[in-house]
Image (cartoon, grey):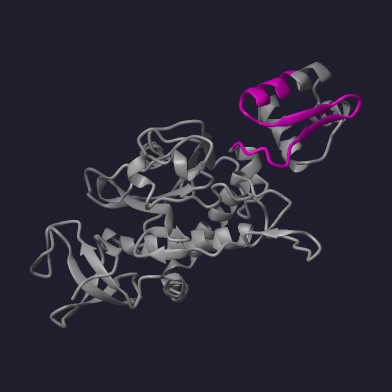
Amino acid sequence: MSTKGSLLKALEENRGITVSGEDLATSLGISRAAVWKAIQELRKDGHCINAVTNKGYCLAPDSDVLSREGILLHVSENDMANRIHVFKSVESTNLTCKKMALEGAPYGTVVIAEEQTKGRGRMGRNFYSPSMSGIYMSFILEPRFDMTKSVLITTAAAVAVCKAIEKVAGISCRIKWVNDIYLEGKKICGILTEAVSDFESGQIEHIVLGIGINYSTAASDFPEELRETAGSLFGNRPVESADDHDDDRPYVGGVTVNNAVTRNRLTAEVINQIFLVNENLGSGNYIREYKERSFVLGKEVLIIPAGGMTNGRNQSEGIKALALDVDSEGGLVVRYQDGSIHTLNSGEISVRTLSS
């Protein structure tokens, strides 16, 4: 680990606490001058580090720059140091993950970026990915089945992200089939599952799971065409933790006003939850939780398929149906207006008030 990385790790371990330059130098086996130089480099990277004369250095509790050192402090999995890769900017974390997979990166590799310049969503859409206000991450996962069941992975990931947000921030989110997570009527997270295949054999060798979370993007910062539908986890509300709540401390927006929830902390918990659900993917236990968090079931929807024809119907402009259930493989069971019942395993839906 570099001097800068070692120093950041030490500061992250003591976030909010002032540590003397001498103690840092001694513990890291470097000079006081080297400590100062590394502090300056970290500040240039955006880390908020306070210097107190005759006392030392303190990483501010609300300093919020994504880093491998900050994430690793909260990751449950062992041996993750060489599998977590954090970039300042990439075209797309999914694209980076696919390239790394083809170059031999192991299962469990995670790519995280401060910014995506060409972030992608489902059905070829762009995913708005500004710097410093989101969490953009992708996983290389081992394929457990063919891509006809890819919706199963996306469904499980949606539950994992919701659980991570609840555990770290105490905020409950809802799910719109298949891959969108909503808070207060606005989309705050999208999930994209893709396959990496061997060209010669045609076999799927890796699954790449991409997750984009709008963490603190203000409503006014979204492109105009997204402002009606997109939101963020915190936006203009206080960014705080649900841990160690005390009734004597103020509570704002359902979360405690202290102990800031950094993106590193939430990113680590998403990693924890994704690995947990991936290990138990075959059990389907998360389907119950998915249905409990869904705001689609029992509502009229407009189905927008990936292709123009589904079940012999021309659906190029969408078709009305009633969402009935989510099956054991994550498919959405719907009833069309003619009374027939089918299960959707691809495409997407919009939820709206529909005329009969």
- The answer to whether residue 265 is visible is yes
| Residue positioned 80% across, 16% down in the render | 33
Residue at the farthest right position: 54
Q: Quadrant of the N terminus?
A: top right
Q: How far from the left and from the top, in percent, is residue 3? A: 70, 25
Q: Nearer the viewer, residue 99 or 56?
A: 56
Q: How far from the left and from the top, in percent, is residue 78? A: 62, 51
| Residue positioned 68% across, 46% down in the render | 73
Q: Nearer the viewer, residue 49 or 300?
A: 300
Q: How far from the left and from the top, in percent, is residue 323? A: 29, 75
Q: Nearer the viewer, residue 318 or 306?
A: 318
Q: Is residue 16 above or below residue 301?
A: above
Task: Say left or right for 119 vs 2.
Answer: left
Q: Quadrant of the C terminus?
A: bottom left
- Find the magenta span and give its range: 37-65
Task: Say left or right for 149 vs 16.
Answer: left
Residue at the farthest bottom position: 339
- Name the image quarter holding residue 54: top right
- The answer to whether residue 120 is visible is no
- Name the image quarter holding residue 298: bottom left
Task: Say left or right for 144 vs 335.
Answer: right
Task: Say left or right for 219 vs 342.
Answer: right
Q: Is residue 49 magenta?
A: yes
Q: How far from the left and from the top, in percent, is residue 105? A: 44, 41
Q: Is residue 15 magenta?
A: no
